[in-house]
Image (cartoon, helix red, strand yellow):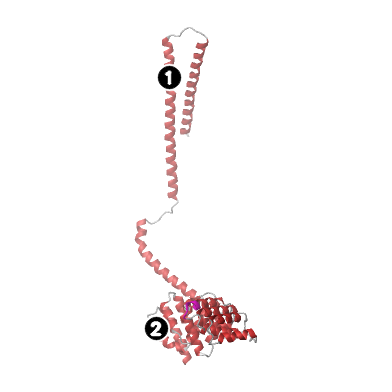
Amino acid sequence: MSEVINISSFKTKLFTIVFLVLALTADVLAQGQVIKSAPVPPVPAEESSFMWYMFIGLLLAGLVGMLVWRSKNKDEQEEDSKKKTSSSSNEKLSTFPEGLPQTSKVLDKQGTADAKGAKSFKESMAKIKQKQFEELPINNFDDLKQVAPYNLLPLSNDDGLLSAVEQAQDEYEEDVAVRELAVKVLAKFRNRNSVEALSQITLYDLSAQLRSKAVSVMAEFDHESVFETILLACADPTREVRAAAARALFQLTFSRADAWTRIARCDDEFRMVQAARAAIESDLVKRSIDRLVHEDEDHAYEAFALVALLVRAGETHEIFELIKDHRDKNVKLAIFQALKVLKEEQTLPDLYSFIERNSLPEDLSNAATEAIRECELVLI
């Protein structure tokens, strides 16, 4: 408070001095004008010199006072700034809780804490993954479903259609343009005659271009009766046909899971083997196996039905290669779960051989043992 009063009084004195200097200056100038306007007796030289000296002295005193005031004001501002900085830093320091350990002690304990934390984290993640796997739909499947047969397409006696079918099946017709015209005619008739004729072209025609065209036409029919032909075309020796068949297969809107199940449940071993090998050669198995751990039941069951087809066709080599090489442990567990549910005794030799040749983690070993136990129960 005293500092504020001193500053105020100093400013008052300074303003007074400046005012006096300005007043004196104005007076001197006024006298100069009077002297010019009205002649007066001459002033002695000594008195005139004294007045000038006094004026200069007052002016210098005012300037010195102003400089002193500015210097003092600057020092006070710097001191106030330092006080504010120190007070703010003290406030920041006061926000930290008391009793914190020293940095060196924390660093000394960091190595042990990190090791324990990493171990605990791995254990927690393993439990979470195990819990997540147990909640997946694959654990709810207890058998391969019974699927109703699909409705057959009608037959047709149309003359144009019958003529196109005859041209398509003519073994001696070497003109590709004629057979291509037959395909265009067949595409206009969505019936059983067209599907049978287009299937023959897809599988046996010498022209790769015509085979791929026939596959695309059958995909447009979008009927369950075209599934197996398109599947076999996925293993065609020509890349053009394989690409067209792959597009056609995923263009179909009916249930592929039901289509796999129908083949897996048929009594025709040759038909099952052909379909299973086509799925393997076209990489459909590798591309579909991840769906075993899909959260959507329909997607998971489609992959399960494909595994069932491979097992019942005796094409299990691909399955055990996936168990050995796949990066996702949950997929491996899902494959063992599928084998456990299917209970196919022909998988027993492969299961025993696989366990003997491979060192499995505890969870996979337990899953394989459960699959073996279920298969052995079928033999009792």
Q: What range of the chain is rendered magenta?
A: 237-242
Secondary structure, magenta segment, majority class: helix
Q: Is residue 342 above or below residue 43?
A: below
Depth check, front residue: 304 or 124 = 304
Q: CA distance from mark 1 to mark 2?
A: 114 Å
Q: Residues within 10 Å of mark 1 (few under 14, many from 20)?
A: few
| Element on which disc 1 rests | helix
Q: Secondary structure at mark 2?
A: helix
Q: Residue placed farthest to the front in the image?
A: 175
Which x, y percent locates residue 228? 54, 83
Where is residue 14? Give x, y as percent.
Answer: 47, 26
Q: Which residue is mark 1?
A: 56
Look at label 1 and name its amino acid. Ile
Residue 277's spot in the image, x, y percent?
47, 84
- Res. 355 mark: 2
Residue at position x 43%, y 23% from top?
61
